[in-house]
Amino acid sequence: MGGRLDIEAALDEIERGRTDAFSRVVHVYALPLRSYLASQVHHLEDVDDLAQEVFLTALRSLSGYRRDEDFGAWLRGIARNKLRNYFRSTSRRNQAMQRFREEVARTLEEDLEQAAASDRADLIERLLRCIAQLPERLRRVVRAGLDGNRPVELAQAMATTVGAIYNLHYRAHQLLRDCLEKESN
Amino acid sequence: MDKDLRDLLAAWLSEEEPSEERRVALLARLREDAAFRRAFIDEIRLLGMLKVVQSSEPRWLRLEDELGWSVEERATVDSLSHRVLEAARPRSRWRRSGQRWLAVAAAALVALSIYPFLRPGKTPETKGTVPVENPVELATAVKLDNVEWEPGEGLQPEVGGIVTAGRLHLRSGRLTLAFFSGVLLTMEGPADVELRTMDRVFCQQGKLRARVPLGAEGFTVLAPGYEVVDLGTEFGLNLTPGRPADLMVFKGEAALSVLGSNGHSVHSALVQHHKAVEVDPGAARIQEVAPQQARFVPVPELPPPNLELAPDYPAEVLAAKPWGYWRFEQWSSGRVPNELADRPSLRVLGGVRQDGTPEGNHWALFQADDPKQALLMDGSWSPPRGLGQGYALELWVQADSLGQNALVSLIDREHGADEHHVSLLELTARSQRSLFEPCAVRFLDRWPPSLSGGVNVFSRRSFMPALWHHVVGQKAGESLELYIDGRLVGSSPAAPNPPDPLAATTPCWLLVGRLKQRALPPQTGEIRPFEGRIDELAVYDRPLTVEEIRHHAGLRVEQ
């Protein structure tokens, strides 16, 4: 599942009233879509809420999808609208920072869309194997963000500086990207 | 690492707030320097991937309801955790159709971390200790009896504490865990047990007793050279290194499999209730022996705390003018009377019975292993659901297990046997059949009445078994609200309703302690029977105010 023909087949079934066929579409696109959203939204709960909203909107708006379009790109288009609303509705103490964030997002939009077009669920899944290959110290840094530890807390726990934590992150990401490239080959 | 890249990331992740001048500089570089832009995108993309791939799969109930996903249909969805687990398990094992449709999502990371140890050609799962990289929360420690821990690394939970994946090494004493799937596991030291996922533990040594509720079947105890898979309800296992192990099934049945060096089953047996076997993996032998119940760890006694309320509690509830109010103080002829004279009573179904303190408060007790039990209101109630209207369901509840348990169901009478819900208040769990957040409460409002769809409100993990909680689920105008112990723990916009009040409601059955009235198998999964205690159930044809809810919740008298 996951090829264009499979998606087409699922969409055909939905058109015939088999709404549950959309579950196959969700299965294929859930991980890349959540990943795309998570690149821009910090809290995972918000990511998952937004992803659900995107799929619900997509299901209700399928008549607006043209079959010659990339379905993933169409979903990300819906996601971008959801993200704009999300950021507007998220109260921030600092309006200047909010404007800055929106400006950064706008500047990145086109390049990020191009980059995300190649994200597939199987590629993202391979990341787990790559994490397992990281040295312990880097693995700890990669994991810490998920546990809710901020760089300053992690720096204290690892008896180092915040700057060093960012460098460890950066190094870990380089190794992970190399690993992913090898895995894809 | 480029300093601009570091600063931009810190700002993007809300770690730091750069000055106006610095923001301008960073934006300028982002616009002008394509390589810098790519580097930043690479970083945030990878951060996004890392975040989702290492997290549990989300629960998307609204989507599932919209799609009408059922357990059976989801069985065909080849989830990430399922695929990896299946790839990692080369050997045969007992399975009932549909039971293993989905490995527990929360355990995905743990499962993935053990993948290298399980893949074909590698060391089988039953050998050695599995490193747990990112422990997930699996259970709550509900009882410790004279526990002494072995020194060194390992989990050492306290009563009420969350227990993650990891190793428990008891020198002596007894520990009882309530898994978020509803499984109750007692272990007696000396014991060395590693919790791997919600439905798999690895035991090197110790006496175990597992009680597995409906929906959590498949709970597996792995041991060196063999495994025991629960196929429903309760078993005990005594394991001493170097000696044959003893297995006894107290209720239901369990599957026992002796594993070869490659992890494949080489000998197996189905052990029925009240039977005992001795298993010697070295000799690949399973031998039936006379059952000696006294040799196994007994079922832990978990006396629930009593619920005592201020004397004016009933008057306060009545002052709030409920449509119906059942106090459970008087039971007669299989019925619980309504405190409002002209309103219907609750009919007792199955073994639900009155319980309480000798001269104090009384409540309804829903006992274990009686999925037929429920309370069904005579007649019907039409909860006001029209534009700007609302209704409320209020009760006190204490759950004995962490399964997915229905508390109050409002079911459209006109759809008859289909049992379409209009409203539902239930406890949620994470299990093979459910991706819900464990230890949470779900309030569902659904219009039109249907088997799927509707709007949900979930609490986050805020419900502890064995403790009494005050719960209110209500539709308040255009909002759905869920309160636990007087606190608003979740809200959601209600679905738009027709302005005509009569077009937005229907006469409903009110069912307590069960999702649906329908018979047991083949619809067992649609029963969600409650186990525990319920008291002071009130339903209102208006939403309660925050002050009323807080006031009612605050009328508990602490013991």
Image (spheres, coloured by chain):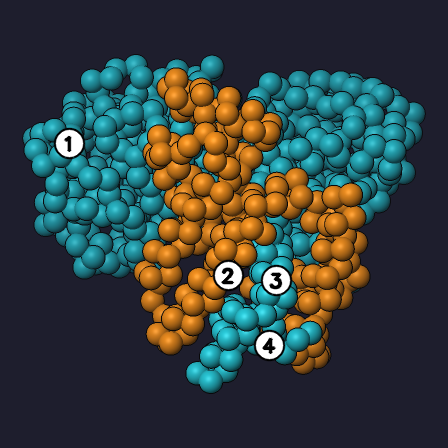
Residue furthest to the front in view is B32
Q: CA distance from mark 2 to mark 1?
A: 46 Å
Would residue B175 be visible to someone looking at this image? no
Name the amino acid type tagged 2. Leu
Label 2 in the same subunit as label 1: no
- Residue marked by disc 4: B4
Q: Mark 2–mark 1 contact, CB under 8 Å? A: no
Name the amino acid type tagged 3. Arg
Question: Percent position (x, y) of residue B69?
Answer: 44, 27
- Residue marked by disc 1: B504
Q: CA distance from mark 3 to mark 4?
A: 13 Å
Label 3 in the same subunit as label 2: no
**Subunit ID for the residue under disc 1:** B
Q: Nearer the viewer, mark 2 or mark 1?
A: 2
Question: Percent position (x, y) of residue A152?
Answer: 59, 76
Give the class, few, some or many, for how many residues have Cα within 10 Å of label 4's Cα (few <14, many ≥20). Answer: some
Label 1 in the same subunit as label 4: yes
Q: Quadrant of the N terminus of chain B?
A: bottom right
- Residue marked by disc 3: B38
Q: CA distance from mark 3 to mark 1?
A: 53 Å
- Residue marked by disc 2: A108
Q: What is the drawing colour of chain A?
A: orange
Question: Percent position (x, y) of residue A58?
Answer: 39, 37
Q: Residue at x 81, y 42 (%)?
A: B117
Q: Which mark is residue B63?
A: none
Give the class, few, some or many, for how many residues have Cα within 10 Å of label 1's Cα (few <14, many ≥20). Answer: many
**Subunit ID for the residue under disc 4:** B
Indicate left or right for B157 with B556 as reference: right
Q: Which chain is cyan?
A: B
Q: In front: B506, or B532?
A: B506
Name the amino acid type tagged 4. Asp
